[in-house]
Image (tube, rainbow, N blue to C red):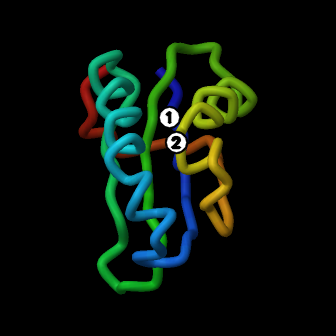
Amino acid sequence: MKYFAVHYTYANEAPEVVALRPVHREFLGTLLDQGKLVGSGPYTDGLGSALIIIRLEAPASIDDAIQLMNDDPFHKEKVLAGRSIREWNPVINVFKD
């Protein structure tokens, strides 16, 4: 498996974010059902950002992760102020493959 860290930045509690949150969570639920979502959630500092960890079958690439996350309603509706996706190597891995 290959892991990817997805970092979102958005205007915390912006009306667009609040309105899309249910369908964003449905999207994440679909990833969970497919075994692709490891975990997700907002940072607790109130600055309007979140972390999503996904896993894809090797030999997945960063392009595969980007393509997958392009389907997130937050991205599709352009409510994100920023997004970065990086391959991540969990050296001490508590996740079950």
Identify the secondary structure beneath mark 2.
loop
The amino acid sitting under disc 1 is Tyr
Nearest the viewer among 58 and 68 is 68
Nearest the viewer among 22 and 94 is 22
How many marks can you see?
2
Residue found 27% across the figure and 34% down from its top: 95
Residue found 68% across the figure and 35% down from its top: 66
Identify the secondary structure beneath mark 1.
strand
Residue 42: x %, y % from top left: 35, 66
Residue 47: x %, y % from top left: 46, 84
Residue found 55% across the figure and 61% down from its top: 8
- For residue 51, side relative to residue 9 (left or right): left
Residue that numbered label 2 is attached to:
89
Residue found 67% across the figure and 54% down from its top: 78
Does the residue at mark 1 contact the one at mark 2 (Cβ under 8 Å)? yes
Q: Which mark is residue 25?
A: none
- For residue 88, side relative to residue 94 (left or right): right
Callout 1 crowding tier (Cα within 10 Å): few <14, some 14–19, many ≥20:
many
The amino acid sitting under disc 2 is Asn
Residue that numbered label 1 is attached to:
3
Callout 2 crowding tier (Cα within 10 Å): few <14, some 14–19, many ≥20:
few
Q: How far apart are the two marked residues, 1 and 2, measured between alpha carbons? A: 7 Å
Residue 19: x %, y % from top left: 41, 58
